[in-house]
């Protein structure tokens, strides 16, 4: 018998620019193997490829694999990840719970966010959250979908929207698209914040001025500031073609949809509630 346990570990590896704490360099001993490939002159029986990881994939382990952002490769004239477009906010999510046999080898169209991972793993691992903790979480457990991945109606009903946000710090008001990243910018100095909501059929994005003192967007009633709005149709999107959608802003041609999603986004973000703490959009 063994005692079940839950382990959440965050790793921060060298990123752009490549950097790491100097003391860690002293912990690295020796060089990379000079001869990593076994010579064909050596009989196979002489080699032993087992390791301490033997049986790793046959044990009862719950695993969640995801990334933190997408990446544009020239789409929309963009490179890298600094946007609220689908290419920047949609990331892979793979969850493995071998005892939930219905989920093995399946896919789901459920809308999901990275903040859903913790409550999902807690439920699947049989570690129920106390009511106070559960009420404070922004995420939704996706466990019902893993247990019934073929139930499309359940997937659509479980979550009706996913949120994301990204900021802009333009240096030139006349050309707001030029040099507008906020890298290494203190949050009190951010100029604009873009909020986006993704539903099963559309993505709606609203840009608003940012108040560095209150660390909130400047929402004006009864109308939000007219800095910029975007509406993209994902009708018919089955996830197989990332280049077909979000190429035309439908905000003017579908005013009723824009109005409905504007209210939805306003309720989720502009009221400043705990639920406004959003994370990257995640649509498996």
Image (cartoon, rainbow, N blue to C red):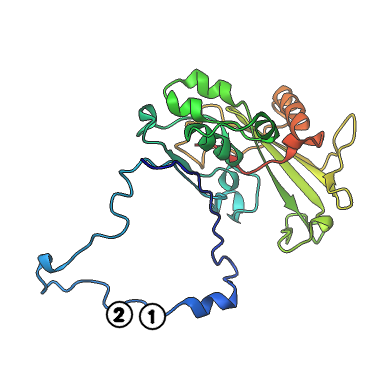
Judged left or right of residue 95, residue 168 is right
For this orientation, the residue located farthest to the front is 1
Judged left or right of residue 235, residue 131 is right
**Within-10-Å neighbours for mark 1: few <14, some 14–19, many 20+:** few
Q: Which residue is mark 1?
A: 31
Secondary structure at numbered mark 2: loop
Q: Nearer the viewer, residue 132 or 45?
A: 132
Residue 113: x, y in percent? Answer: 59, 38
Residue 254, quarter of picture: top right
Residue 189: x, y in percent? Answer: 83, 58
Tell me which residue sits at (52%, 24%) in the image.
155
In the depicted structure, whether residue 42 falls above or below residue 119: below
> Is residue 231 among the parts visible in the rendering?
no
Tell me which residue sits at (39%, 30%) in the image.
100
Q: Are marks 2 and 1 in contact (CB under 8 Å)?
A: yes
Judged left or right of residue 224, residue 111 is left
Q: Which residue is mark 2?
A: 34
Residue 13: x, y in percent? Answer: 54, 64
Residue 122: x, y in percent? Answer: 53, 36
């Amino acid at each position: 018998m063994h005692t079940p346990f839950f382990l959440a570990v965050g790793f921060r590896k060298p990123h752009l620019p490549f950097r790491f704490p100097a003391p860690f360099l002293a912990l690295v001993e020796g060089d990379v193997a000079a001869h990593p490939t076994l010579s064909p002159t050596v009989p196979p029986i002489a080699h032993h490829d087992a390791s301490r990881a033997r049986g790793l994939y046959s044990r009862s382990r719950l695993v969640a694999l995801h990334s933190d952002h997408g990446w544009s490769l020239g789409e929309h004239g963009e490179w890298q990840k600094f946007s609220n477009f689908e290419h920047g906010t949609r990331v892979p999510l793979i969850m493995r719970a071998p005892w939930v046999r219905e989920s093995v080898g399946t896919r789901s169209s459920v809308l999901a966010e990275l903040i859903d991972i913790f409550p999902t793993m807690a439920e699947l691992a049989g570690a129920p959250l106390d009511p106070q903790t559960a009420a404070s979480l922004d995420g939704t457990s996706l466990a019902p979908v893993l247990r019934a991945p073929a139930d499309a109606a359940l997937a659509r009903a479980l979550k009706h929207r996913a949120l994301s946000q990204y900021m802009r710090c333009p240096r030139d008001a006349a050309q707001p698209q030029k040099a507008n990243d906020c890298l290494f910018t203190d949050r009190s100095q951010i100029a604009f914040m873009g909020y986006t909501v993704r539903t099963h059929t559309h993505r709606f994005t609203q840009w608003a001025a940012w108040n560095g003192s209150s660390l909130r967007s400047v929402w004006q009633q009864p109308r939000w500031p007219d800095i910029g709005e975007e509406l993209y149709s994902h009708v018919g999107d089955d996830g197989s073609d990332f280049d077909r959608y979000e190429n035309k802003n439908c905000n003017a041609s579908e005013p009723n949809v824009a109005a409905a999603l504007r209210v939805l986004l306003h309720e989720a973000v502009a009221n400043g509630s705990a639920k406004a703490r959003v994370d990257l959009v995640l649509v498996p």
